[in-house]
Image (cartoon, rainbow, N blue to C red):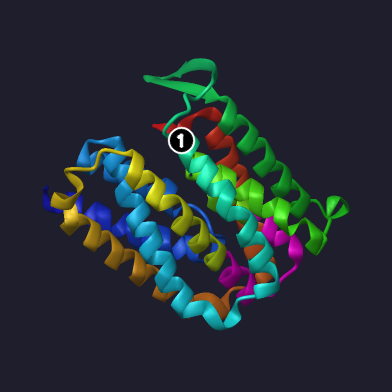
């Protein structure tokens, strides 16, 4: 690897971790293509990303554990675990259904059924948050449903954070509780799905890539620390608006097939 490659790895891991400390999603989406570029192997890229994601969530839990709303986390997380395991299992046995292929410039992109459904749900939640007259607050009885849906898509596509955030933001938690509870749920889903990936993927060469994984972990942890420092300075109303806009952009990119490249 060249020095520039290490520089890109550090910048992306740090920036993604800092941003996702507030939004709750995006670290895996940003890190997977970077690892793929460096390792030239998709399965190893997914596994390396999973290691960084899991380690970062453990550290963030240590930072934010006092603010966790366990009344939200327990039913949401318990429903997410079996759904995440099922989704992760299907990842290694399921061929994506491509609805349409199109070309844009020099690129070729696929609109896949799973990503289309996921993206529509995500955009719908974002619009509900942004348009006041559409505003709804979910009852706590629906926590199991949110956990099951976000866990399943998390295991299946790896994009569990965005949908988890979409559900949690509807429960009108405090800023600290929203972030801390999302971290715990993400950690629960990571613990459920990561062993499935390592069981089903051939990862013989991953042990030789320990240096870049350690660098990515260190950079991500630094980003989380900076995020914690800035947490009190961020207005929650502004945070929810920015998260909703991010969800719309993320959903459109997912539907268009741009995140599969």
Residue 178 placement: quadrant: bottom right
Q: Residue at x 34, y 71 (%)?
A: 222
Q: Is residue 245 visible to us here?
A: no
Residue 180 lies in the magenta-colored region: yes
The picture places residue 25, in percent across and down from the top left corner, at: 52, 55
Q: Quadrant of the C terminus?
A: top left
Q: Residue 136: where, in percent of width, then height?
A: 84, 56
Magenta portion: prevailing SS class: helix
The stretch of residues the image draws in magenta is 166-182
Tell me the residue at 53%/21% (across/down): 97
Total tally of numbered discs in the picture? 1
Q: Is residue 117 above or below residue 152?
A: above
Left or right of 6, for residue 58: right
Within 10 Å of the Cα at label 1, are there few (<14), some (14-19), or many (20+) other Cα atoms? some
Which residue sits furthest right? Answer: 133
Q: Is residue 150 left or right of residue 15?
A: right
**Residue at 37% in and 44% down:** 197
Q: Is residue 97 magenta?
A: no
- Residue 227, image x and y in percent? 46, 72
Tell me if residue 230 comes above or below residue 190 in the rendering. below
Residue 176 x/y as whole percent: 61, 76
Residue of label 1: 91
Q: Residue furthest bottom?
A: 66
Image quadrant in which you'd find residue 77: bottom right
Left or right: residue 89 compared with residue 131? left
- Quick one: SS at disc 1? helix
């Amino acid at each position: 690897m060249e020095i520039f490659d290490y520089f890109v790895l550090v910048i992306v891991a740090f920036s993604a971790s800092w941003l996702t400390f507030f939004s709750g999603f995006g670290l895996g989406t940003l890190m997977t293509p970077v690892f793929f570029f460096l390792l030239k192997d998709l399965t190893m890229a997914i596994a390396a990303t999973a290691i960084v994601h899991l380690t970062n969530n453990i550290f963030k839990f240590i930072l934010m554990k006092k603010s966790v709303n366990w009344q939200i986390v327990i039913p949401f997380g318990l429903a997410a675990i079996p759904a995440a395991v099922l989704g992760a299992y299907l990842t290694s046995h399921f061929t994506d259904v491509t609805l349409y292929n199109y070309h844009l410039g020099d690129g070729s992109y696929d609109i896949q059924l799973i990503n289309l459904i996921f993206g529509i749900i995500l955009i719908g939640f974002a619009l509900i948050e942004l348009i006041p007259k559409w505003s709804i607050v979910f009852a706590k009885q629906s926590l199991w449903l949110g956990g099951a849906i976000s866990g399943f898509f998390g295991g299946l596509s790896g994009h569990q954070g965005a949908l988890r955030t979409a559900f949690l933001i509807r429960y009108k938690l405090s800023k600290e509780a929203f972030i801390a509870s999302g971290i715990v749920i993400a950690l629960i889903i990571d613990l459920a799905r990561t062993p499935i990936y390592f069981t089903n993927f051939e990862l013989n060469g991953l042990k030789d890539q320990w240096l870049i994984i350690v660098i990515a972990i260190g950079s991500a942890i630094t980003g989380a620390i900076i995020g914690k420092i800035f947490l009190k300075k961020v207005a929650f109303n502004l945070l929810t608006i920015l998260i909703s806009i991010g969800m719309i952009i993320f959903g459109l990119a997912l539907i268009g097939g741009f995140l599969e490249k």
